[in-house]
Image (spheres, rainbow, N blue to C red):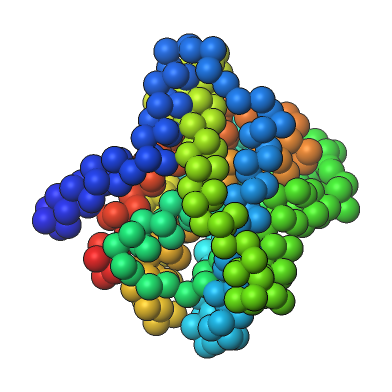
């Protein structure tokens, strides 16, 4: 174990020197230093949608090449179970250890049960840089894992609020989860890539190759700014809650490791499933929570997902998970 941690730390330092990661660090510095550096909200949303388009389309093309394999079905089933079950563990931890109110605990559990598209993008880029193969269908697994945790957390929240006579429109919640911009772009792009295959990839090669790296750098710069500012505002979570922002990714990674072994996944696929299980959503889940649980504190669920879990997974967690999966 000490050797594995040392190797993960060394790989984490190498990963830290990647341009995209350095731009995230620049954003963190700018946010903590209270710089006026910022990207317009419309630009940030455009970058987010672009990344989902690129990730979904490339995954669809690779899935079309690989076909509907047994590995995809096993990985998808494992990812679905992980997404459904994680809020059941996270919610009582946030209530009892973090001492959060019901709505905030449910919203934060939803964020940690759902997945981060950009963390997945960084993980796929990391594996590719180290020559580790993985299936394009893992993007479909990413899409599968996004919504179930949100629904589980909302069911928990509704049951907790039942005694108060509260409730939310089920139709509105389902619409936000499945037809929200990020989710629709990810799933739609995957289906378009699946339909057009390599022919479509040839037409968008530059758009999805070199341009993608530049867009990822800009997006991570913006995420670094947002992460720092969410952790320095007046509603900063207490230390015991911040500690859960690292404990839950590690617990999710352990569950992902067990699930990947039971599913018999290849090392590259296993590393990505572990990373997805450890990641936390700061796009889809917060968007759904703003609609379904407006009383929840965004400084907590966004601060933990974006300011704690995201950098931890990006810098140290990613190489550690790859080592655990036997991919390195």
Residue 17 percent across, percent down from the top left: 29, 40
Quadrant of image for the C terminus: bottom left
The residue positioned 26% from the left and 70% from the top of the image is 326
- Against 37, residue 183 (above or below) is below
Q: How many labels does the image show?
A: 0
Tell me if residue 229 can be seen.
Answer: yes
Residue 147 percent across, percent down from the top left: 67, 57
Task: Examine the image and state in which quarter residue 137 appears.
Answer: bottom right
- Against 323, residue 160 (above or below) is above
The residue positioned 84% from the left and 43% from the top of the image is 168
User: Who is closer to the viewer here, 105 or 328?
Assistant: 328
Residue 142 percent across, percent down from the top left: 57, 62
Quadrant of image for the N terminus: bottom left
User: Who is closer to the viewer here, 209 or 172?
Assistant: 209
Residue 276 percent across, percent down from the top left: 48, 58
Residue at the limit of the structure toward the left, as seen here = 3
Task: Examine the image and state in which quarter residue 163 appears.
Answer: top right
With 191 as the anchor, is 311 left or right in this view? left
With 300 as the anchor, is 296 left or right in this view? right
- Against 132, residue 174 (above or below) is above
The residue positioned 23% from the left and 42% from the top of the image is 13
The residue positioned 39% from the left and 82% from the top of the image is 264
Tell me if residue 88 can be seen.
Answer: no
With 169 as the anchor, is 261 left or right in this view? left
């Amino acid at each position: 174990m000490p050797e594995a941690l040392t190797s993960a730390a060394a790989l984490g330092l190498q990963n830290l020197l990647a341009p995209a990661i350095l731009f995230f660090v620049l954003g963190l510095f700018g946010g903590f230093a209270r710089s006026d550096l910022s990207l317009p909200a419309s630009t940030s949303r455009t970058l987010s949608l672009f990344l989902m388009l690129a990730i979904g389309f490339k995954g669809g093309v690779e899935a079309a090449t690989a076909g509907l394999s047994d590995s995809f079905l096993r990985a998808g089933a494992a990812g679905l179970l992980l997404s459904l079950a994680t809020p059941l563990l996270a919610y009582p931890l946030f209530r009892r250890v973090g001492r959060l109110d019901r709505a905030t605990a449910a919203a934060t559990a939803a964020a940690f049960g759902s997945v981060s598209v950009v963390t997945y993008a960084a993980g796929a880029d990391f594996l590719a840089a180290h020559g580790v193969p993985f299936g394009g269908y893992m993007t479909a697994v990413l899409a599968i894992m996004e919504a179930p945790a949100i629904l589980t957390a909302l069911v928990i929240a509704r049951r907790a609020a039942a005694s108060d006579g509260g409730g939310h429109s089920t139709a509105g919640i389902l619409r936000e989860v499945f037809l929200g911009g990020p989710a629709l772009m990810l799933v739609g792009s995957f289906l378009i890539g699946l339909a057009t295959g390599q022919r479509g990839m040839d037409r968008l090669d530059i758009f999805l190759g070199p341009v993608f790296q530049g867009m990822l750098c800009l997006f991570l710069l913006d995420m670094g700014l947002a992460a720092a500012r969410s952790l320095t505002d007046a509603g900063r979570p207490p230390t015991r809650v911040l500690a859960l922002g690292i404990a839950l990714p590690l617990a999710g990674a352990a569950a992902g490791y067990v699930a990947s072994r039971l599913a018999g996944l290849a090392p590259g696929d296993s590393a990505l499933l572990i990373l997805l299980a450890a990641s936390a959503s700061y796009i889809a889940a917060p968007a759904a929570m703003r609609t379904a649980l407006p009383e929840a504190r965004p400084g907590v669920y966004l601060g933990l997902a974006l300011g704690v879990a995201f950098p931890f997974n990006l810098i140290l967690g990613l190489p550690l998970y790859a080592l655990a999966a036997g991919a390195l």
